[in-house]
Amino acid sequence: MNPFVSVIVAVYNDTARLARCLAALEKQTYSADRYEVVVVDNNSDVPVTSAIGPFPHARFEREPTPGHASACATGVRLARGEILAFTDSDCLPEPGWLAAGVACLCGTPGCGLVGGQVELFAADPQHPTAAELLSIATHMKHGHFIEQSHWALFVNMFVDRRVMEKAGPINPRVDNGDIEWSHRIHAAGYRLAFAPDAVVHHPARSRFLQHCHRTIRFALHWKQLRQIGGLGRGARFWIGQHLVWPLRDIYRCLLCHPKLTPLQKIQTTFLACLLIPLRIVASFLVGVGLISDPRKHYA
């Protein structure tokens, strides 16, 4: 018999896209009686319960403390599944997503965590913006994250509940709780695996301002990871994160991209270069406490 799976979906002010996510989760090829969907409303300004009604697998919970990790931790606490699957309210899982993720988790010896493939898409695929092309080319490279850095994101993650006996539960105080949790699971001796067939589709960032917000938010999150999780310390990591890795991504993901036109390469490279000094300035301002994140939300 297939293991029972709890799909945890954290949501904040995203009713319309949540409805589309839940519709996609109803179409899973996984045994219909062997999974549930736990939707955790992270204190939305407008109640999201209107998006829940037509979907028999979904049930509604609420977590008033702001933060993606807080919402996911609540989902785990209230879930019934042997396996915990995570995705975001703005994602569209493919029909075989659950089956592929569970098969990889159960079929990989010593595996405690699986990250699936995240495919980003433009609002208008025929006319993507430069910001969307930058997002599609450079963001959410789950296979690289797992194999090189030993972490995955809640956007597409599967975890065996038993790993919490050794690694502990999600820390709700860490904004990037998925990264910190992944590192603890790996440190506890579990293998992390990538499941390319467990696919979710995620909207690309359509405006450059969204990339700027993401850059600032990541500076805040990494500061917290250094303080609480001990991750990302040292000058070598700082130089890599702010200079080496961005320049590497510009070369590998943009300038060498086989499908971008010369004009698109120029546009996306220009935007990516603008983000490098912003990343450095944001890191400095966050480090001295001049930038704070009052809500700690992930949207």
Image (tube, rainbow, N blue to C red):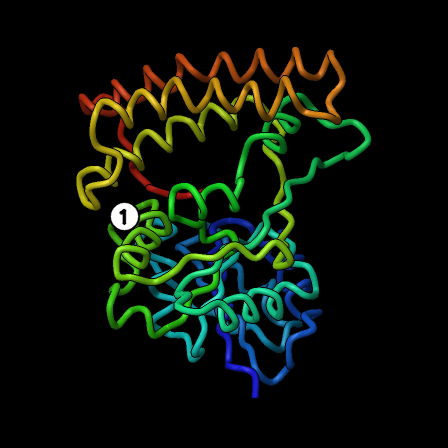
Query: Nearest the camera: 172 or 55?
Result: 172
In the displayed structure, would residue 74 be above or below residue 273? Answer: below
Q: Residue at x 44, y 28 (%)?
A: 213
- Above or below residue 78? Residue 188 is above
Image position, residue 161 (x, y; %): 37, 73
**Residue at the image position 25 percent from the left and 19 percent from the top:** 285
Q: What element carries label 1?
A: loop
Report x, y in % for residue 7: 51, 68
Figure quadrant of residue 268: top right
Image-based side of 200 in relation to 275, left or right: right
Q: Which amino acid does label 1 sit on?
A: Val
> Residue drawn at (29%, 61%), measured in percent from left and top?
189
Depth order, front residue of 151/91:
151
Count up the numbered dots.
1
| Residue drawn at 18 percent across, 21 percent down | 288
Image coordinates for residue 165, horizontal then vertical, percent: 25, 72
Residue that protrudes farthest toward the front in the picture: 109
> Mark 1 Cα within 10 Å, few/some/many (few <14, many 20+)?
many
According to the picture, the residue beneath numbered tag 1 turns out to be 174
Q: In the picture provided, is 5 more to the left or to the right than 278?
A: right
Q: Nearer the viewer, residue 103 or 154?
A: 103
Q: Residue furthest right?
A: 126
* Spot occupied by residue 17 in the image (x, y as percentages of width and height): 62, 52
Dividing the picture into quarters, in which one does residue 284 lie?
A: top left
Residue 266, placed above or below residue 174: above
Q: Residue furthest bottom?
A: 1
In the rendered view of the protein, which quadrant contains the N terminus? bottom right
